[in-house]
Image (cartoon, rainbow, N blue to C red):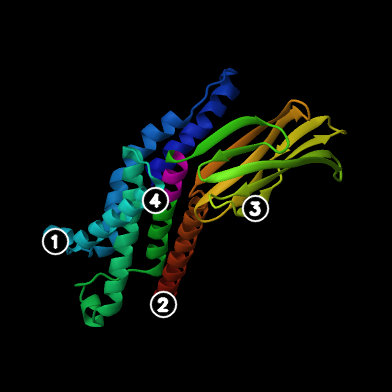
Amino acid sequence: MIVVCASVFLGTIYPLLVEIFSNNKISVGEPYFNSVTIPIMMPAILVMGMGPILSWGKVDIIRILTKSLPSILLAAVISFIFFWVYGSYNMLGLAGIFLAFWIMSNILLTTVQQLIVKNKEVTQGIIPKYSSGMILAHLGVAFLILGITGSSIWQKEKIIRMKVNDETSIHNYNIVFKEVSEFMGPNYVALQGNFWIYNKKRNIITELKPENRFYPVTNNSTTEASIHTNLARDLYVVLGNGDINEGWIVRIYYNPLVVWIWIGAFAIFMGGLFSMKNNLKKLKRLSI
């Protein structure tokens, strides 16, 4: 994790340092981060999936592999259902989704095992004892992988010129451009589009209202995206330049599983807090 964080930090800060000291501009983009972080994270995630079933100083490889088999099968079944629902896959997506469900299924099965075994087996190290902080942190990493994989592999984007009452579609949604209106904000003038979002059954899901804002004092313009989020995806619309005669440039984005990135980050953060709390309690007892 430290190596990955350092690599991301270097890729982020290095172009800024080059620009400051040499006045030259360089860019470090997606290929760098993918080629550096993925080879490091893949083996780490595989080990993390087995983390909850490892005992300190009492590692039996055959026994661990035997105990891992149910979670591997569960992860394979869930991954198969997942790809069957989404209807498309590639090797990177297959690896990411399987690893995410591998961690989740391992934690689920070992948690159930922890609840049903005798306490004696836990205290003797036959069944490893683990903390709520570790469970939360590992689940957070699994959620993070799920969100990053889904939003990277199955993201869809559509850029189209639309007039009022025009209709387009993306993934399983139909988007109708119902109207455009102008209104005054506190310090800006806004042009707001109204887009109705329908599912395959022609039931309206939501209305998205992106804006183009102009600030007269600073003579600046901004675009305000309108986003609808649920656990399965983010759907958002951006209203670009245009007019009533030619229509407006509309950008529509479908980003699956993005919310799980934020859920995962929050779970990792909470896992860290729980671990810190437990360690502080231990230190307090030792000092007494």
Look at the numbered discs 1 and 2 and tell me whether their residues touch, using CB distance below 8 Å.
no
Q: Which mark is residue 85?
A: 4
Residue 240 inside the magenta-drawn segment: no
Mark 1 / mark 2, whichever is N-terminal: 1
Residue carrying label 2? 285
Residue 173 in percent (x, y) is at 55, 45
Q: Closer to us: mark 4 or mark 1?
A: 4
**Chain part drawn in magenta:** 145-152
- Along the line of sight, which residue is nearer the eye, 166 or 236? 166
Between the residue at mark 1 and the residue at mark 2, the CA separation in whole angstroms equals 33 Å
Q: Is residue 62 above or below residue 97?
A: below
Residue at disc 4, secondary structure: helix
Q: Is residue 71 above or below residue 18?
A: below
Residue 114 in percent (x, y) is at 28, 74
Which residue appears at 34% of the width and 55% of the height? 101
Q: Which mark is residue 60?
A: 1
* Amino acid type of the residue that numbered disc 1 sits on in the rendered structure: Asp
Between the residue at mark 2 and the residue at mark 3, the CA separation in whole angstroms equals 54 Å
Between the residue at mark 3 and the residue at mark 4, the CA separation in whole angstroms equals 23 Å
Residue at disc 1, secondary structure: loop
Mark 1 burial class by Cα count in 10 Å: few <14, some 14-19, many 20+? few
* Amino acid type of the residue that numbered disc 2 sits on in the rendered structure: Arg
Quadrant where the C terminus lies?
A: bottom left
Residue 132 in percent (x, y) is at 40, 69
Between the residue at mark 3 and the residue at mark 1, the CA separation in whole angstroms equals 54 Å
Q: Is residue 232 left or right of residue 40?
A: right
Mark 2 / mark 3, whichever is N-terminal: 3
Residue 224 in which image quadrant: top right
Q: Which mark is residue 206?
A: 3
